[in-house]
Image: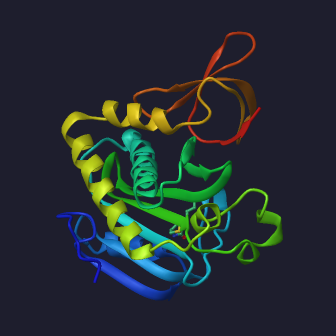
Amino acid sequence: RLGLKTSLIGQQIHYKESVDSTQKVAHRLGMENALEGTVVIADEQIGGKGRMDRRWHSPKHTGIWMSVILRPQIPLSMAPQLTLLTAVAVAQAIVENTGLEPQIKWPNDLLVNGKKVTGILTELQAEADRINSVIIGIGINVNQAVTDFPEGLRAVATSLSIEKGELINRASLIQTIFLKLEKLYLLYLETGFHPIKLLWESYAISIGKTITARTLTGNITGKALGINDDGVLKIEDKNGVVHSIYSADIELG
Ligand code: BTN
């Protein structure tokens, strides 16, 4: 139905009208040895999951709610690189399909005109230090109107169609994401993270700016220096101490 041009991503697609969360379905398929590149897409999620135990609002017909199963032979500690890789793939696809200019807010939010259009949630199935599968959840606000967002979200979230001023073709955007994701993933397996990191930095908003990272153990404010080759964010505080941030919410300023 999508007229696939990929040989890995999306070779197997499980489409569901309504699910609790595509992540849950993908986890089950991952345990059942689904092929690498298998994708679960839903038209609506009742229990969409965001990072840090938040909910992800996933109304019917308007967004792209999907999870991709990858099985890279990499150490567990490198898995966050795939989140950054996915953010680049989605950013490229948005540029190509809409002409909008998305920016990446570390680690994985895509913003258009300063508001969030995409969130990415990476979850792992692993035994000891061996990855069985990486489940990459991608949520894109595509055709929502302003009134489709809960009031509390309108200042911080938007959709591609709101920013573009016209409806966006979801099937063709999905197709482009598959292509970009496959290309970057194969490049990554072949050459490592470095070229992906450079691409990521070309879309990043926070580098060089003052940011606050809200982590589980406290807040750190300082200048964002960039990411290292593991995808870890480096922040230099006012005393010149450089902190490595593995997981946090970022605020600009
Ligand atoms: C975030 O920014 O907090 C991440 C949001 C991830 C949402 C996607 S939608 C498809 C997949 N299924 C889920 O339940 N969550 C992810």
> Residue sitting at 54 percent across and 49 percent down?
102
Asked if residue 204 is positioned above or below residue 30 in the image, the reply reads: above
Q: Looking at the picture, how far across and down is residue 77, in whole percent?
A: 40, 39
As drawn, which residue projects farthest toward the right? Answer: 151
As drawn, which residue projects farthest toward the bottom? Answer: 17
As drawn, which residue projects farthest toward the top? Answer: 240
Say how many tags the image has. Answer: 0
Q: Looking at the picture, how far across and down is residue 84, in whole percent?
A: 45, 44
For the N terminus, which image quadrant? bottom left
> Residue sitting at 62 percent across and 67 percent down?
165
Front position in the image: 232 or 59: 59
For the C terminus, which image quadrant? top right
Front position in the image: 195 or 227: 195
- Tell me the quadrant of ligand 1: bottom right
> Residue sitting at 45 percent across and 74 percent down?
169
> Residue sitting at 40 percent across and 36 percent down?
199
Asked if residue 121 is positioned above or below residue 229 in the image, the reply reads: below
Q: Looking at the picture, how far across and down is residue 181, in whole percent?
A: 32, 55
Asked if residue 132 is positioned above or below residue 220 in the image, the reply reads: below
Q: Looking at the picture, how far across and down is residue 68, in whole percent?
A: 37, 65
Front position in the image: 156 or 236: 156
Q: How is the image coloured?
A: rainbow
Q: Is residue 36 left or right of residue 68?
A: left
